[in-house]
Image: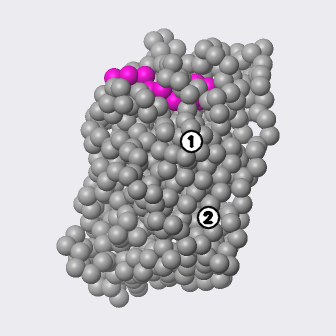
Amino acid sequence: MRNRWLLSSKALLFVSLLFILTVLVACGASAPEAPAQAPAAEPQAAQQPAAEPAQQEPAAAQEPAPTAEPAPAMEAEMAEPTVVRYVESQGEIQVETNQHCGGNRPIISQFLPYVEFLVEADPVTAEFNPWLAESWESTPDAKSWTFKLREGVQFHHGYGEFTAHDIANMAVAKGDEDCASSTTSFWKEMAQAEVVDDYTIIFHMNNPSLPMPSVVSNLPTGLELISFSKQQLDEVGYENFDDVKPASTSYYQYMERNLGEGVVYERVPYEHWRFQSPFEEMEIRWIGEETTRLAGLLAGEIHAIALSRDLQPSATEQGMKVIPAQQAFSQLSLFFGGMYFMPGDPDFDPTTPWADVRVRKAMNKAINRDELNDFIFRGEGERMHVTACCHPVLDSEIYNPEWETRWEEAYGYDPEAAKQLLAEAGYGPDNPVKVEMLNYRTSGEPESPLAVEALPQYWGPIGIDVTITDIDSGAYSQMRRAKQIQHMMFANVFSFRKIQDRIRTNAPSNTTSHTFSHPFMEEKYQETLNVYTQEEIDAIGREVANFWYDIYWTIPVFWFRFNFTVNPEVLDDWVYLNRGYYWHNQVPATQ
C-alpha cells in the first residue's frame, strides 16, 4: 500500500533544495532563529561537610568492584587536515547556554567539544576506560566510590590544574534540586563528595550506586559531570557564566558563541595531555531544517551533518559519505502523555484514552513497522521489543527471547484487531480517540519528525483522529516536566542505558520526566536501593522489562545506528559509538 507520506512531495523537496543551494553558493548559509534562552537556577557551590560520613557496613559475600586499568596511549600527532575550521550541524539546540544546569541532555552537544569526563566509553565496545580518572573502585556495598584523578591536566584560559575540588563542586551542583540536568536524580542521593587530596575523590552515596562509572562517563547515561573550573565559577558566578568563556580541559577550548547561529571552538594553545585536536577550529551550527543542512554540506560550507536516511541519497550521489555509528545504540519510540498512575495524583486525567491498556495495545498494532522501517531507516532499523532498555546484545542479561515469540499477537501489525480493541474500550466512529502529537526538532534526531508525520496514515483508518502540533523542543520539555501533556503524545530518539538507570529515572519519587509513573515502578526502585550486586539488579530489571512489555507502556519502534553524512574531502573516517559524542576519534582527510 502506498501511503501519502511515502510520496512525501519529493518534487517540492528537490526544487526547494536546488533553490537553497543556489542561495548558499551566492550568499552563504544562514541559520534559523534559536529558541529563547530559558533561565536556570543557580546551583549550590560545593562545601566540605563538617563531619565524616557514617561508616559503611560492607556486604560480607560481595567482592569489591574491580579497579579500571589505564587505557592505551592515544595518538600524539595527526596529519594536516584540508580545512582550518571543521563545521558540523546536527540540528537545533534546546537552550543556548554555558550554564551546565540550564537543561537536560539535549543541551549537552554545545559543551562536548571542550569538556572531558572522568571515564570514557570505548567508541566501539562501550567498555569503560580511564579518562580524567586513571582508576576507580567501590566499597563492597557500592555506596562509596573512589576515583584517582590524572595529574597535570590543565584548564583553559589560564585557570590552573584540574583537581578533585573541581569535580566535587560539579557533583554537588548537579544534585541541587534546582538543577535541570538529567542526572540530578542520581546526584541528589550523594551524601558527600569527599576530597581526600588534589587527585583523590570519594563519592559517598546514600544507596548502592552500581551505575556510578556510567554516570561519570560520556555515555548517554552520564554526559553531565563535566570538567568545569571551580575557581572560574567562584570568580564570575554561575549566573554570569553565559558572559564568559568557560574553562574546561579538552583539546578544543571555547572561542565564541553567535546566538541563533552556533558555537565556535579553537585548538588549545599548548600541548594537550592527550593529543592535539585534528582541526585548528571547530564550529557547531544550529540548523533545524534538513534541506538547509544538506545544502550547506553540498556547498562545502558544512562538513558533517545529521541527515535522515530519506535524504542521504541526495548527498551520496554528489560524492558525500555516510559514516554510521559502531552500534545500533539509538532507539526511536512513541510515548503516551499523562501516564500518571500513582494513587491520588491530581494530574491524572482518567478521560485520557490510553489510560486503558486496550487503547495502548490497539495503537501499537495499528502501525506497520516493516513499512515504517523501509521509509525512515531504509530497512536498517532493528526490532525493539521494549522501550528504554533490553537490547538483545547490549543488555542480554535483561532481554527475554519470549518477547519475540509473542510479538505478532502482542504488537504485530493487525488493523482489524486494533479496531476491535478500540471498540472493546468504548471507542468508534461516533467516539474517536483524539491524539495531539507534539512534533519538535532537537539536535541529532532527524528521524523523530518523520515518524510523527507518518502516524495519521496508520491511526486514521482505525478511527483515531490525529492532530500534529509543531512545538519548540524547550517548550515541550517544560510541559513534560510540569506534567502538562495529558491527551498528548510525542516521539523521542534517545540512547541505550542500563536497566538500573531506567528504573531510577522512571521511579515516581525520583523522576523529573514523569514518563510513566506507576506504583510497580516505585516498588521496584525501592528494591534496588537495598541490593549490592549486578545480579540482583538484573533480576529486578527482568521483572520491570516484562512488566513494560505486557502493559504497553510506550510504542517501541526501532533500534538503529546514528549516521553522520560527511564531506570525505574533510573527514576520512569517524569512529564513534553514538550521535558523534567522540570528536577525538575523527580522522581528517589530508592533502
* Observer-nearest of 168 and 316: 168
Mark 1, Cα crowd under 10 Å, few <14 / some 14-19 / many 20+, is few
User: Up-down: is 431 above or below 583?
Assistant: below
Q: Which residues are magenta?
A: 242-252
* Observer-nearest of 216 and 492: 216
- The nearer-to-camera label among 2 and 1 is 1
Is 479 left or right of 95, judged from the image as shown?
A: left
Specify which label sits upstream in the sequence, 2 or 1. 2
Q: Residue furthest top?
A: 26
**Residue at x 76%, y 49% (from the top left corner):** 69
User: Up-down: is 491 above or below 432?
Assistant: above
The secondary structure type at the circle numbered 1 is strand
x, y percent for residue 469: 30, 51
**Residue at x 76%, y 44% (from the top left corner):** 70
Mark 2, Cα crowd under 10 Å, few <14 / some 14-19 / many 20+, is many
**Residue at x 54%, y 64% (from the top left corner):** 143
Is 42 left or right of 577, judged from the image as shown?
A: left
Asked if labels 1 and 2 touch by Cβ distance under 8 angstroms, the answer is: no
Residue receiving disc 2: 139
Magenta stretch, overall SS:
loop
> Can you tell which quarter of the image residue 271 is in?
top right
x, y percent for residue 166: 48, 37
Residue receiving disc 1: 197
Task: Check if residue 461 falls in the magenta segment.
Answer: no
x, y percent for residue 215: 54, 53
Q: Amino acid at mark 2?
A: Thr
> Can you tell which quarter of the image residue 397 is in?
bottom right
